[in-house]
Image (spheres, rainbow, N blue to C red):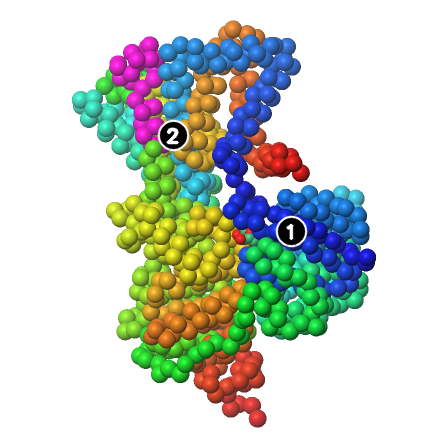
Amino acid sequence: MEYVVEMLNIRKEFPGIVANDNITLNLKKGEIHALLGENGAGKSTLMGILFGMNQPDSGTIRMYGKDVRISNPNVANELGIGMVHQHFKLVHNFTITENIILGVEPKSGLAVDIKSAANRIAKLSEKYGLNVDPYAKIEDVSVGMQQRVEILKMLYRNAEVLIFDEPTAVLTPQEIQDLIKIMKNLVSEGKSIILITHKLKEIKAAASRCTVIRRGKLIGTVDVAATTEAKMAEMMVGREVSFKVDKKEKEPGEVILKVENLSVQNSRKVLGLKNFSLEVRAGEILGVAGVEGNGQSELVEAITGLRHAESGKIFLRDEEITTKPVRARINAGIAHIPEDRQKRGLVLDYTVEDNMVIEIYDRPPFSKNGLLNREAIRKYSEEIMKNFDVRAGKGAESMARSLSGGNQQKAIVGREVELNPEVLIAVQPTRGLDVGSIEYIHKRLVEQRDSGKAVLLVSLELDEILNLSDRIAIINNGELIGIVNAADTDENEVGLMMAGVRKGESA
Amino acid sequence: MKLPIIKGIKKETAVSLLAVVFGLVAGALFMLMTGNNPFAGYAFLFQGGLMSIERIGNTLATSTPLILTGLSIAFAFKTGMFNVGAAGQMLFGGFCATAVGLTLNLPKPLLLTLMLIAAILGGALWAWVPGFLKARFNVHEVVSTIMMNWISYWVVYYTVPAYFKGEFLETESRKISDHASLKVAWLSDLFGGSYINLGILLAVIAVIVISFILDKTVMGYELKSVGFNRFAAEYAGVSVNRSIILSMMISGALAGLGGAALYVGNASNIQIGILPSQGMDGIAVSLLGANSPLGVLGAAIFFGLLYSGKGFMNAMTNIPPEIADTIIATIIYFAATSVMIEKFIDRIIRRKRGE
Ligand SMILES: Nc1ncnc2c1ncn2[C@@H]1O[C@H](COP(=O)(O)OP(=O)(O)OP(=O)(O)O)[C@@H](O)[C@H]1O
Ligand SMILES: [Mg+2]
C-alpha cells in the first residue's frame, strides 16, 4: 500500500488508565488525516508515541512499509516526522531564523551561517505561502505567525510527515483559514499531515479521512466527504450532540458589575484599554466580541485585579473594587476562568484536588487554624470532577500535569462555577474542548445566568458569543465600538463592528 | 518530561540511591588508580565514622549543620527560591548566638533559648534582604544572597576582633562558657564523650516541623503554589511578594540555626575570614535529598559520615583524604544530572516489562 505511516495495534497504559487500547491509524501519502476524539480520548498520547516522546507498551510503527522504533524525538526528526505542539516551544528573544536553526545550525568555519539559513527559510516560506520574516523576533510576532514558525521548523528539517496537535485552538478565525490553506499547500507538495482538532468544521474544510477514537479505543476511520458533522460527533461522543444552546427569554435584573471609563496599560506600557464602560446585570450573559489582542485581556485583568487600572472605576454591586487585591475580589464574588489554563489556571505540579481549592483553601471546611483538611478537600474535588466529567487516571490525586488538555479546562471551569460567584468571567471557556464538553459547559453557563448570576463571556469564537450572549459588547483597539442585543444582530454586523466600524457609520 | 512513578519506590529515591552508588563506584576507581585497595579504603572510611559509639556521635554532630543548611536550601527550592546564601545566613546566625552567649550571664536554659532565638532571627534577617529585593525590585536572589554572604563575612571579620577578641588569637572570638554551649553532659556521656550536642535534636525537630509546614498547613500550600507557578498563585489571590519574603526568611532562619549548631554546638568559638563550607554543601544535600525534608536528613547524615570517616581512612591507608571529597563531588554530579539517571531507570523498567 501507499501508506507513509502505519501505527498498528498501539497500546499505552498510564497508572489507572489505558490511554491507547489497540489503536491502528494509517496515513496515506499526500493526505490530511484528521484525528478526532473526546477530551482525554488519547489523541496526544498517540501522537506523542509517533513523535518518540512516549514509548508504546505494545504495537508496531511502520514507515514506508518498514518497521521502525522511534525511541526519542531526534529519531522522529531523522525519519522525517515533525510535530507542532499545542504549546509552542520557541525562544522569545531570538529571531525567527535563530529559533528555526536551533540545534541544526549551519556552520561556515566556526561561525553560524545565519545568512544562508535565513535565505533558505525565506525560500521555504515563499514556496508554501507562509509569509514569514526570517529576521523578526518571536516576541514581536502574533500567535499565528509563531505557529508558522513551528511549521517552518519542521520543513527546515525536511519533515515529510507533519503532526499538528490542536493547532487552531489558539488562532483567530482568519488565521484558521490561512492555516488550512497552508496545510493544503503542504499536501499538494507531497507532505502528509495528521491533524488533531475538536472543530468538525475544520475537519470538513481540510481533511480527506478522519480517524475517531473514544476512551482510548478505535471507533473507526471514515471518509470525510461522505460523513456529516453530526455523524462524526456521534461517533466520537457515543450519543447525539446538539449544537444549539437552549436558552429561555429572561428579564435581566439589577447591575452587578459596572466598569466606568476604565483605562488600562498593556504589557508594552501603552493603553490597551481606553475609557471603557460596561454594565453586566444579574441574569444575563454579556459577550465581549473582538479580534484577539484588542483589549480583552486588559479588561479582564483589570476587573480581576491582576493588572492595575490607570484611571476609571470598577464596581461590584455598589462597592468600588478598583484597587482591591485579587483575593478580596474573589471573596466578594468574582470568579474567573482564565484565558491560559497552563499559565494561570493551574499549578501543574499540584494534584487536581489541590488545584480545586486554590482560591478557597483558607476557608472552612478546607482548613482550620492554619491546617489543611485533606478529607474535605478530597470530597469537594471529587464532587467537581463528577459534576464536570473531569477524567483522570488516579482521580483527585492525579497530578494536574497528567490530565489531557480538555480535562484540565473542564476542571478549571468546574472550579470557578462551583465558587457560585456573583459574576463569572469566562474567557475562552471552551478552548480545546470536544463538542460534547462544549455542549455541557454552555449549559452550565446558561444555568448561571438563569439562576440570576451575571456572566461576562469573552471569546474569539463568534459562534459561541452569538449563541450564548444576551447582549454583545464589541471591542476594537481597546475601545468600545458598541453594544447590541444578541437577538437583533447577526454575524455580519458583529463582524463589521469587530473591524472597527461603528453601528450606523457604514452605508 | 512527565515522570511515571515506579510502583513501591519513588523514582526520586531511586535516582538518589543510584547517584550514591555511582559516586561510591567512582571513588573505588580513584582508589584503584592511586594504587589502593578500595575495599579496605571503604572499610576504614565507614569504620572511621561508625566504629564506636563516640564516632557515631561525632558523625551525627558533623551532619547537624548539613541537615539544617540542606533543609534551608530545600525549603527555598520547594517554594521557588534558589538560596545560595545559606553560608552567610549561617555565619551571621552563628555570630549572633555567639555574641549573646559571650555577653549575657544567665542560667543555661534561658541563655541557650536566647542564643537560639538570636541565631534564628539573625539568619532570617540575612535572608529577608534578598527576599525583599526580589519582591520589591525583582533582583535575582542568587545575586543578592551571594552579596549577603560577603557582607556577613566582613561584618564578622571586623566585629569579632573589635568586641569579642580571643585571648591569644586575633582571628577568632573568645571561647563561650559551658553555660552557653549546646553541648550537654548527658548527651556527651551517652555517646562516650563525643562532641555531639543538642544541635542534632534541633535539626531533627526542624525536619519534622518543616515537613509538617510543607505538607499540612495553609502556609505551606501557599508557599509551594508560588514556587511551582507564581502566575497561577497570583491569579488565585495569593500574595506572591509576601510569600517570597516569608519563604526566604524561613530558609534563612534554618540556616541561622545551622550556624548555632556549628559555632556554639560543635565548636565553641567563631573564626573570622572564613565562610562555612556547609552553606554550599547544603545545596548538594538538598539535591541528593530531592528537596524533601526526610531526604535531606538522610543525605546530610551520609555526607556527614563521609566527612567524619575520611580522617580515619587517611590514617590507616595511603588513600588521600581528598578521595572522600571526590566521592562527594561525584555524587553531586550524578544527582545534578539526575535526568540521565532517570532515563536509565526508565529503560530498565521497560526491559523488565519485556519490550
Ligand atoms: N504522563 C501521563 N501520566 C498519567 N496519565 C496520563 C499521562 N499523559 C496522559 N495521561 C492520561 O491519558 C489519557 C489520554 O490523554 P491525552 O492527552 O492523550 O488525551 P487527548 O485525547 O489528547 O485529550 P484532549 O483533547 O483533552 O487534549 C488522559 O486520561 C490523561 O489523563
Ligand atoms: Mg491533547
Q: Residue at x 36, y 32 (%)?
A: B207
The answer to whether residue B203 of the structure is visible from this angle is: yes
Q: Name the chain under label 1.
A: A
Q: Are dots 1 and 2 in contact, CB under 8 Å? A: no
The answer to whether residue A460 of the structure is visible from this angle is: no
On the same chain, marks 1 and 2? The answer is: no
Mark 1 packing: few (<14 Cα in 10 Å), some, or many (20+)? some
Q: Name the chain under label 2.
A: B
- Badge number at residue B68: 2
- The residue singled out by tag 1 in the image is A22
Identity, as a three-letter code, of the amino acid under mark 2: Leu
Q: Residue A229 or B264: which is nearer the viewer? A: A229
Could you give the CA–CA distance between mark 1 and mark 2, rounded to whole angstroms? 52 Å
Q: Residue A251 or A219: which is nearer the viewer? A: A219
| Left or right: where A219 falls relative to B223 | right
Q: Helix, strand or loop at disc 2?
A: helix
Q: Residue A9 or B51: which is nearer the viewer? A: A9
Q: Residue at x 45, y 50 (%)?
A: A395
Looking at the image, is A190 positioned above or below residue B10? below
Q: Which residues are magenta?
A: B183-207
Q: Residue A497 or A386: which is nearer the viewer? A: A386
Q: Residue at x 52, y 40 (%)?
A: B5
Identity, as a three-letter code, of the amino acid under mark 1: Asn
Image coords of residue A301 (percent x, y): 43, 65
Figure quadrant of residue B32: top right
Image coords of residue A214 (percent x, y): 58, 59
Image quadrant holding the N terminus of chain A, namely bottom right
